[in-house]
Image: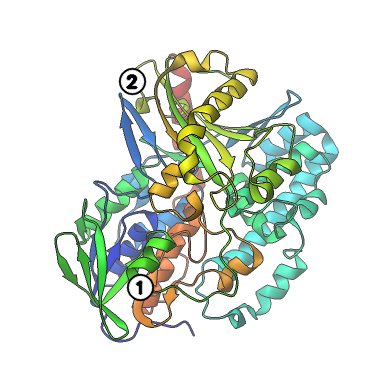
Amino acid sequence: MTAVVPGRTDHVVVVGAGLAGLSATLHLLGAGRRVTVVERDMRPGGRAGRLDLGGYRIDTGPTVLTMPELADEAFAAVGDSLYERVELIALHPAYRACFADGSTLDVHTDAEAMAAEVERFAGADEAAGYLRLRRWLRDLYRVQMRSFIDVDFDSPLSLLHADLARLAALGGFGRLDARIGRFLRDERLRRVFSFQALYAGVPPARALAAYAVIAYMDTVAGVYFPKGGMHALPRAMADAAGDAGAELRFAERVTSLERSGQRITAVITERDRIPCDAVVLTPDLPVTYRLLGRRPRRPVRLRHSPSAVVLHAGTDRTWPHLAHHTLSFGAAWRGTFDELTRTGRLMSDPSLLITRPTATDPGLAPPGRHLHYVLAPCPNTDIGPAAASWGELGPRYRASLLAELERRGLDGIEAAIEEESLVTPASWHADGHAAGTPFSAAHTLFQTGPFRPRNVVRGTENALLAGCGTTPGVGVPTVLLSGKLAASRITGRPPRRAVRTRSAEAIRATASMSEIATKEAPA
């Protein structure tokens, strides 16, 4: 049985109005709790923030939305609906993959469309292999979601159930790269279904095959974009929470927690004392442990995921070969992961994610202008350049990135930039993220499931953790689940999946209308 906070839990203070904190807030409100949300920034979002720069509306955090039903589940807890508050657009293709040999592949989440694209790209045998891979990914997802992701663990013994054997039978404890290779022989295709391991902070050659569940979310379940940008999601969640009775306090930093024995009795901010019966803490782990005045004992120090350099560029032109999301792969692969996770060097032949949100929502930029987001994975500050060195290194790396983009067909990109923002590991470090990475602790075997930092705190009976540093882990879907799991520890309600979700057909219809509008808009 899952441990539940003992005693009164009538009033809960949630520290942080990011996706995890807002998810926890909505689930707590739905269970009849009074909730106060305290956020240091001027607006909700946390990592999913917004930067307004010269008329460009820039998402500062995640750019990929998958599994929107998990967000809708939080809205449904208070009788609300994600789909009534946010216009979601299904992306077709979900990604465009561009390879060093000049070949391109559009990644579709529809089975028939993707099989046809794979056959065009690599032949009929690979198309058949893709369909077998798709079935395996779906089976893997079903087993993991119900028993390993959307669940609270109290000890490693919680793993001992029938689905552990099912996961083993599916090959979940083998290596990701090798397992994908059983279905696909083309090395380029294998990259498309294994690069997601980088989100988990582990190279595909060393990652467990179980992490292919992330590829399921990206390549099978569908990729979406909220009109108005990704920040529209936390903004809508905050509006729903406010309408349901939550007190939202922005621009107010938490400085300490007041304690009586094993209970937190109040949250202290820069200007107030807020009494509480329980608290949900969503900042990055170092900040959370500092507030608690203690950290859990671990036999081995936490290993962190690689970081990233992000260039946000508002431009006076765009490049037609870019989709909404474009994966630009270098020729190197295994060596790239060694640089990111072992040697601590910047990628010598980078693989990049280029997002062009104005391809779907032109209103994110001034008329006739375009917004580009270039993400280059880089080593975290534990193994790579220190945060202090990025003041000098950042501009040089920006220049090398732009030169590389020019070589890859984005001719004239530097001259096209009107507004820009460069984010480096120093930026993440300044925001309080351990090891200068927004991707938190890596999902190694002993930092996953019951071995990941728990959402309960030893010696503090009414404090819960939520966010990417705790269970289930990194990524928008799992962060939303972390808020729900933390709430369930307070309310005693078992975490279970909502059944009320919008049909895929309805979302696809919205996407079709958006595609027509986008095609008719002037370039």
Amino acid on which the number 2 mark rests in the picture: Pro
Picture coordinates of residue 182 (x, y %)?
83, 52
In the depicted structure, whether residue 117 falls above or below residue 427: above
In the depicted structure, whether residue 406 falls above or below residue 437: above
Q: Nearer the viewer, residue 234 or 116?
A: 234
User: What residue is drawn where x is 36% and y is 80%?
Assistant: 460
Q: Quadrant of residue 328?
A: top right
Residue 42 visible? The answer is yes
The reply to whether discs 2 and 1 touch (Cβ–Cβ < 8 Å) is no
Of the two numbered discs 2 and 1 in the rendering, the one whose residue sits closer to the viewer: 1
In the rendered structure, find residue 366 and report the number of the disc placed on it. Answer: 2
Local packing at callout 2 (Cα closer than 10 Å; few below 14, some 14-19, many 20+) is some
Q: Nearer the viewer, residue 495 or 372?
A: 372
Amino acid on which the number 1 mark rests in the picture: Gly
User: What residue is drawn where x is 48% and y is 44%?
Assistant: 425
User: What residue is drawn where x is 47% and y is 26%?
Assistant: 359
Query: Would you name the residue on which mark 1 appears?
Result: 293
- In the image, taking residue 391 as reference, residue 139 lies left or right, namely right
Q: Secondary structure at mark 2?
A: loop
In the rendered structure, find residue 506 and report the number of the disc placed on it. Answer: none
